[in-house]
Image (cartoon, coloured by chain):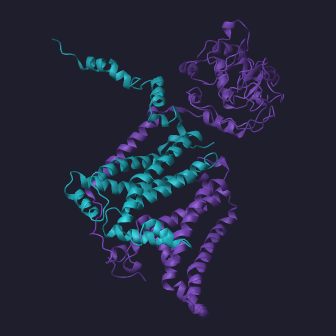
Chain colours: A cyan, B purple
Amino acid sequence: MRVPTSTQVSEFVRNSRLWRSIFRYSYPTDRRNRIMTVAKNVFLHLHPNFVPRGAIRVTYTWCLGGLSFMLFLILTVTGVLLMFYYVPSVTRAYQDIKDLETVVTFGMLMRNMHRWSAHGMVITVFLHMCRVFYTGSYKPPREFNWVVGVILFVLTLLLSFTGYLLPWDQLAFWAITVGATLGGAAPLLGPQVNLLLLADYEISQNTLIRWYTLHVIALPLVLSLFLAVHFWRVRQDGGISQPL
Amino acid sequence: MAADGSKPALISVRQTTAESKWAGSTCPKCSKPIQPGEQAVLCPKCYTPQHRDCWADNGNKCAVDGTPANVLHRGARPAAGAARPSTAPAAGDGTPAPAHVTSTEGAAATAEPPPVISAPAAPAADLAATGELSQPAAVTASSPAVRAEAAVTQTTGGPTTGGTSRPARPPAPAPAGGRANGAGRPAPARPATPAAPGAQVSRTAQRSAARRSQAQLTTWPHLLMPEFISSVLLIIGLTVMAWFINAPLEEHSNPNRTPNPSKAPWYFLNLQELLLHMHPALAGVIIPTLAVVLLMAIPYLDINSDETGVWFSGARGRRVFWISAIYTTVMNLALIMIDKVIGIRASVETALPFLKTAWLSEIVTQTMVPTAIIWAVSVGLYLIIAPTRPTVREVMIAYFTAFAVTWVLLAIIGSAFRGQGMELFWPWDRGMNRIG
């Protein structure tokens, strides 16, 4: 019996019903397939089919928006993995983090990646804001997308801040004490804001579960919503900005 | 799809019926409603319905945005579908219809071509009639028609739209190189001057014309590859960092043992730094809220889009950036040192002893004086750049830079230079010797 060559196997696979049901277009080496692959793929169709040469220079965008989004994805994946092992209870939280670091396979790596990505995202989002500002990319017709971007920046800070409490160590506890004191200094509404932030008169189990819920579900959902608007508006308002 | 000019070169006549979407809409040329039974055309750019005769009267141009297009002489199509006669079957009809390739912005010859481009008119018609111009054909064709058309493409609104004033951009390397982004979205139609036929092409139209004269690259791979590479580098870098540097974890939280110093996360240390110098409400709530609101307001104050897409909007803006960055750094450091050495609160209370009443002193020293200082420093920044007669954009650059530099600088000071009791230390001092 003749052994099929790799080309034959590859041909057979790529002509099979299964393969063709998944991939409608062949590998995009020609113009048509390049267009169709981008236009017909749910992930890629965020992009336009064509981009102006001047707008995608790396020294223009520095990939900062994309890197911020990538960090958000990394944070989501590592965050989900951490959630498997972490219980937001004042009696267990700290020990769960310890176990993550010592017992869970790759737990330390996951936690480290989550932590550094969180810091990284604050940095890249801020730099992205600076890039957009200094290239004048907020100007009409992109005004509203700039506003959405500022909201995303605030949400990024809030996400990072809510995650700060979860390890339940001294660093977390006192950083949140300082932060909540800052918020509690609001004129007129100070005590109410403080109560809203802590869900108690001091940092307690109520605070932990509140911040945990905000951190793992509420704020990510809100952020995703604004991300969707942000991306959509980039396309709607004329793509990546460029000189007139 | 035609590689050059994805928009139709020709528009077809439509018979208006009672069911037509455009039935009853107002024709921008004659300002009368388009009645069922009348022939109508849709502008290929803004899709505004108008009378077929009004279109012709207007010099075969749209009465809204001046987009030229020639009416295809064939049986009127009652269909309410999209007007996309992209393959031009004009020749097949046997009618001597003027059939010219119009560019996306529609700067091509008209039915009665002006003298400038009258010569190549006929060959252009031939080309269009053959249907889709493949890209290589359009690039390499030596036909004078194609070259003429390419040249006309560069000057939007060229001879046919009453000579608008947009300066021609330098010729794009390949005007035919796939200006096909029209496939995705129609150009934003903003009929700014509805009843002004022959008026200047709108700014939006000029803008998109300029944009489209640029080389367009396929997203795959020209955009996706940089995205992919930067993502991979990010993941590799992050993994390496996470492998070698552990996230901090201190001992179990203990409400009864306050660490000294107690610090917020680093990105809030700038606010915590402000807290050292002014009232908590000002530092923790009012100033950050104001900063966010002002950030959001920027694009509604600075609305000149001409400067979009250029770093710092040019050399002047870059200069303003540096002036503001240096000014802000010096001012921040000076204010921190002044508050440390002299002490605002103490000096005010010394100067005005009657303020010793606790609540009055707090209002003056913790709220009013810091607010006044912030105002003074902000006005000072404007006064410094005022002699150069700054544009709105340059003022924005000055103040945004002041914000960004302060945000970063105070975070650095809070992270690295504040030690026990939030006193100033050199970062390498391990909290032993205060600065100053």
Quarter residue B212 falls in: top right
Q: Residue at x 41, y 52 (%)?
A: A217
Q: The C terminus of chain B is located in which quarter?
A: bottom left
Closer to the camera in the image, B6 or A179: A179
Q: Residue furthest top?
A: B94
Quarter residue B220 falls in: top left
- On the question of residue B237 being in view, the answer is no
The number of callouts visible is: 0
Relative image position of residue B337 (x, y in whole percent): 49, 79
Q: Residue at x 53, y 54 (%)?
A: A151
- On the question of residue B64 being in view, the answer is yes
Relative image position of residue B353 (x, y in whole percent): 59, 93
Depicted B353 relative to depicted B139: above or below: below
Depicted B369 relative to depicted A109: above or below: below
Relative image position of residue B219 (x, y in whole percent): 48, 33
Q: Residue furthest left?
A: A1
Depicted B87 relative to depicted A198: above or below: above
Relative image position of residue A75 (x, y in whole percent): 37, 51
Quarter residue B123 falls in: top right
Closer to the camera in the image, A100 or B45: A100
Q: Residue at x 58, y 59 (%)?
A: B295
